[in-house]
Amino acid sequence: MSTPTFAPPQFSDSHFLEAIRQHGFAVLDAAQLSRLAEVPMSAFADWSPSWNDLGPDHYLRDGGRYRRRRHSCFVLAPDGVSQVAHRPHWQPVEYNALHGGMQRHFEPMPQPLLMQAPWQALLQWLASVASAIKGPQTWYAEAHQFRIDTADGIGRPTPEGAHRDGVDIVAVFLVNRHGIKGGETRVFAADSPHGQRFTLTEPWSLLLLDDARVVHESTPIMPTQPGGYRDTLVLTLRAHGFQENPDTVTVDSAHG
């Protein structure tokens, strides 16, 4: 029996920012993303194979083996983008009850990708989106490459459930889906039961979220053929520094 899917809502190039301001989220297709960020579609195609080389996530507290990832951090300032020294990922338990409160160390994203001009352009565009929504400032960005697989029968893109990330803006790029069903995206207003559900299926389509306004989750995936997986790129932008474990902060958060 097939799993029903709902198409993502459509937002125009000129109105997606207003949609985020009004409703807390917007979706862009790959052609819109390429046009708005001035990143050629060929760059997205060039980046996608790097998802085949992600290390396992050893921190899953549900005992699962379905998630692989890499992680890198950047400062997005008015005068340009800079990568910071490799650092662990940390979230407070208030935002991630399952995996918060611990330092999680992942391999960095491939340096040849991060040095490319299109990658820099993508980050600069995301900074401009965040500044348009929240006001101009320096942004502290974390980038996560994820692969959720179905080798054990089921994969959970958001094992923590519906959540906020404790940042200002979240960008979720659907990089690829292969041999799966499920993986429905659900976005709910943080202060009411109002929400929408839809399935991102187009490679390099983008969900933009105002993290203060909405909570989000993706439903589990199941295989429709051997080797099924779902690849995403998640970028979070936060003002005033990276999220830090208050028990270990001894230096400026921009350089931690």
Image (cartoon, rainbow, N blue to C red):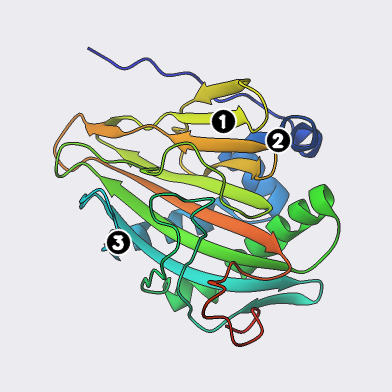
Percent position of residue 107, x then y:
36, 73
Under tag 2, what secondary structure?
loop
What amino acid is at disc 3? Answer: Tyr
Q: Earlier in the sequence, mark 3 or mark 1?
A: 3
What amino acid is at disc 2? Answer: Gly
Percent position of residue 21, x then y:
79, 37
Mark 1 surroundings: few (<14), some (14-19) or many (≥20) residues within 10 A: many
What residue did someone put label 1 on? 187
What residue did someone put label 3 on? 59
Q: CA distance from mark 3 to mark 2?
A: 30 Å
Percent position of residue 172, x then y:
53, 46
Question: Position of 157 compared to 229: left or right?
Answer: right
What residue did someone put label 2 on? 24
Q: CA distance from mark 3 to mark 1?
A: 25 Å
- From the image, state whether disc 3 or disc 2 is nearer to you: 3
Q: Please tell me which residue lies in front, 72 or 176.
A: 72
Q: Are marks 2 and 1 in contact (CB under 8 Å)?
A: yes
Q: Please tell me which residue lies in front, 255 or 9.
A: 255
Residue that sits furthest to the right in the current view = 135
Under tag 1, what secondary structure?
strand
